[in-house]
Amino acid sequence: MRLLVVANRAPIRKTDTGWSPSIGGLATALLPVLEEQGGVWVSMGEEPDLPERQPYPAEDPNFHVRRVPLTQETLDNYYYGMSNRVLWPLSHYMIEHMELNDDFYADYRDVNRRFAEAVVEEAQEGDQVWVQDYHLMLAPHFIRERWPEATIGHFWHIPWPAMEVFRILPQARDLLRGMLGCDLIGFHVDEYVNNFIESARVLLGAHVERNIIHWQGREVRIETHPLGIDTGRFQQMTEEKETQEAVQNLRDETGTEHLVLGIDRMDYTKGILRRLLAFEKFLEDYPAYHERVSFYQIATPSRTKLETYQQMKREVDEAVGRINGQFGTDTWVPVYYRYRKYTQRKLCAFYNAASVCFITPLRDGMNLVAQEYVTSNDGGVLVLSELTGASYVLDQAVKVNPYDHKALAEAIREALEMPEDERKERLRELKEATARLDVHRWADRFLKAMDRVAVA
Ligand code: ADQ
């Protein structure tokens, strides 16, 4: 049976030598499924000269990429507007960043409808549809209208907020109806499942039985499916000679006994500024650690067109300058800061070299960096914000409240001073938990759940 994946971005990218699969996340999980089962990946067409329908691989295709062409204005409203300036901050409980605008919503609706039309045009009997994420909340409803017997799943990658927060959105009910076009909706953790069910119950008056929402004569199952990483790939890459050389270079570069690491997209949900301020407090409180610890923050440029993101980058730049200006010496750089993308191999080197990974989002659907660290490290400590999905599945992390300035600084000290036996035991359990979440197992479990709803 073929699979129709519906996601904002395509799983392949153009390189100097031709087209190749994107690395990481969804593409890693779903391309093997498409290769085996065949199907279509429907995504947005951001660039006008890309083909609307592209066989992949070109010579002997396993599947097609179908693009929904968008003008710049539509892209600005649907993607930078409704998706990233309304749904993103709302879902992360950061309504101070929310910018409501009718044009954003009109184009969001329109793009979702066009995605649905593309899906229905591509559909063959027996195909299953798997929609991804917050860019495409209305697509399930539009697909269902045109193709009533379709089997439709949706996986939501970010938090689903408490009903009382979700209802702030003027289009909350419309969006919920859009999602209820599905047969199956998956979230990372139970908390989001419960929030979604509560939203449907209260805002739409839907009848709910355990994790089933009865809606317009159909049943919609709401399930927890925590997403993982490609653990085999990270393990293997970490062991390779080239990676270990990069680890050594990194140690030589910093020259300190300990490296504390932060890796994130540059996003206000990730808590980068508060993390830096906590490291500053740690240096103030514990001068014995001066010259012995460096903090390495890697931030990937993200949504750089948006003013909020530009403003946050300025604040982070400024904090790094201030801390290094105050504490740095001729032989010690307290904070290393890199604003760029790295290869996965280089990330593995950072993970392997770090004594502590300091992951403190103010809110995060899951957080895959935490899983990448525990997979690629062998003796370190994971400090993790309790406001992440990952904190529900990675029990043995040192959990912190990312808004608690003192506790954050104290967590760095606790991690650095943890006895070796405890570090090893915690890391062993964290590795086991991460292996259970592996992205291939995740895809397999979700697709099996789709099969169950298809026959129900
Ligand atoms: P993100 O918010 O992007 O994902 P996360 O889960 O941490 O957050 O994934 C980030 C990915 O980007 C990781 O795989 C990491 O290796 C990579 N990355 C980060 N910095 C990089 C750099 N400088 N260079 C190269 N790669 C870099 C959203 C949700 C999360 C959820 C995921 C998956 O916000 O909560 O975990 O989707 O569902």
Image: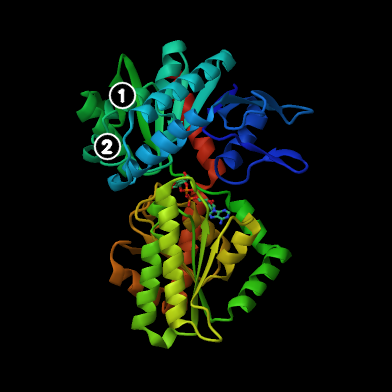
Q: Report the residue at 33% width, 61% height from top.
A: 402
- Most foreground residue, 185 or 102: 102
The numbered disc on residue 166 is 2
Q: Earlier in the sequence, mark 1 or mark 2?
A: 2
The image quadrant of residue 141 is top left
| Residues marked 1 and 2 touching at CB (< 8 Å) | no
Q: Position of residue 157 (x, y in %)?
A: 43, 41
- Locate the C terminus and report the quarter of the image it occupies: top left
The kind of residue tagged 2 is: Phe
Q: Position of residue 168 (x, y in %)?
A: 24, 36
Query: Which element is circle 1 on?
Result: helix
- How many residues crowd around disc 1 within 10 Å: few (fewer than 14), some, or many (20 or more)? some
Q: Is mark 2 within 8 Å of ligand 1?
A: no
From the viewer's perspective, tell me whether residue 69 is left or right of residue 275.
Answer: right
The image quadrant of residue 58 is top right
Q: Report the residue at 26% width, 30% height from top.
A: 170
The numbered disc on residue 263 is none
Q: Report the residue at 66% width, 74% height from top.
A: 248
Asked if residue 183 is positioned above or below residue 328 in the image, the reply reads above
Q: Report the residue at 35% width, 44% height from top.
A: 89
Asked if residue 91 is positioned above or below residue 53 in the image, the reply reads below
Provide the residue designation for mark 1. 174
- Numbered-mark total: 2
Q: Position of residue 274 (x, y in %)?
A: 36, 64
The kind of residue tagged 1 is: Asp
